[in-house]
Image: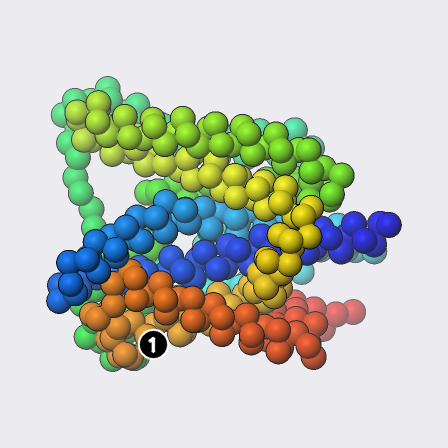
Amino acid sequence: MEQARIAQRIEVVDVIRGFAIMAILLLHNIEHFDFINRPDYLPDFVKALDKSIFAVARFLFSGKAYAIFALLFGFTFFLQLNKQQKLGKDFRGRFAWRMLILLLFGVVNSAFYLGDILMIYATIAFFLLPVFNLSNRNLLIIAIICLLQPIALFSITKIISDPSIEFVKVSYFKGTKEYLANGSFFEVLWSNLTIGKKAVWLWSWEKGRFLQTYALFLLGYLAGRKGVFLPQHRKVWGKVLVYALIAAVILFLAESLSNEYISRKAVSKPVGELISSWYNFSFMLCWVALINLLFIYEGFRKCTHFLSYIGKMALTNYMMQSVIGSFLYYGFGLGLYYYTGASYSLLIGILILLFQVYFCKWWLRTHARGPMESIWHRLTWIRKS
C-alpha cells in the first residue's frame, strides 16, 4: 500500500513538473525566447489572433510556470535531504556542491537563452542550508515574509511619502535585440552571458523574483515535510484551490484597479507589480491544486501521462529548449523572430513538445534518468566515500 502511495505521489509530481516545462516551452516560443517581435507583414486577422494567443498564454503561464518549477525544486530538496538523513548522512555539503554544478549548467544554458533561471535557482538555493532544520512554523513565517516582498513595500512607502519622486522607465533588455538579431553565434553566446545576464538579474530583482523564489523553495520543502502530495491529503488541495482562486480573483481586480485609480505612475507601477507577484503565486497554487485533485480520475491520469516523461527529464528538456529555441529564432540561426507571430510560434512550440515527449519516452526505456540528470547525479556523488 505504501509503495503504491509513493508511486502515485511521484507520478503526480512528475506530471506537475512536466506541466511547468510544457508551459515554459510554449510561452518562450511565443516570446521568441526573450526576443519579442511582431511581424508587420502578416495579415490583419493573423495579427489579431497573435495578440489573443499572446495575451492568453501570458495570462495562463507567465509567472506561474516558473513558480511551479521553484515549488517543486524545494520539494526535491526535501526528498534528497530526507533520504540521506535516513541513511545517517549529512547532505549539506553534497547539496552545496550540487548547486555549484547547477550553476555551471546555468552558465551554459544562459549562453543560449538569456532568460535562464538555473543560475538564479542555484544561487538562492544556498540560503536553504542555514534554515533547513528550523521548525515548520518558523519556515512558514520566513516564506510569508518573503512573499510579502518587504523591500518592495518599503520602497512604495518611501515613494508615497516623497511626492518629488517621479516614475522613470528602465529598459533592461534594450541592448539585447541588436545582438540577438544580427550577432554571430559566438557573439550571441558571449553577449547573453554579459549584457543579457545583467539584464535578467536586474529585472528579476525589480520584479521581486529573488524573494518569491526563496519563499517557493521553502514552501516546497514544507510540502515535502507535510507529505501533501500523498493521496490522503487530497482534501488539503481542495481547500488550497478554493482559497487560492478567491485570492487570485481579488488580486487580479486589485491590480486592474491600481492602474486605473492611482494616478501617480511612480506609485501605481510598483504597486501593480507587487500585486502581480501575489496574483501569480495564487494562480500557481490553483494549477498545482487542480492537477492534484484531478489526478484521482483515471481518464485525467491517462491524458496527462505524457507530461510525466517531460517532468522526469525536466533539466534536460529545459536546456534542450534553450538550444533549439535560440537556433530557431535568433539571427545566427533561422531568424524566425522576423517571420513568426504568436500563432506560428505556438505551433512550433507544440512540435518541439511532441519531439521532447517522444525523445523522453525513447530515452527512459533504457535509462533511469535523462542525459543532463545523469551527468548532474554522477557529478554530485563523485568521489563518494
Instruction: Kindly tell me whether residue 378 is visible in this rendering.
Output: no
Task: Check disc 1 and give the amino acid type.
Answer: Phe
Between residue 224 and residue 356, name the one nearer to us: 356
Q: Reply above or below: 70 against 179.
A: above
Residue at image location 30% in from the left, 48% down from the top: 55
Q: Reply above or below: 27 against 237.
A: below
Between residue 126 and residue 234, name the one nearer to us: 234
State the image coordinates of residue 20 (x, y, percent, origin top left). 51, 54
State the image coordinates of residue 142 (x, y, percent, origin top left). 55, 33
Could you tell me which secondary element the residue under label 1 belongs to? helix
State the image coordinates of residue 367 (x, y, percent, origin top left). 68, 76
Q: Which residue is mark 1?
A: 327
In the picture, residue 351 is in which quadrant?
Answer: bottom left
Residue at image location 21% in from the left, 24% down from the top: 262
In the picture, residue 263 is in which quadrant?
Answer: top left
Residue at image location 32% in from the left, 43% down from the top: 206
Picture colour scheme: rainbow
> Please, which residue is most extreme toward the right here?
1
> Is residue 246 left or right of 133 when viewed as pictured?
left
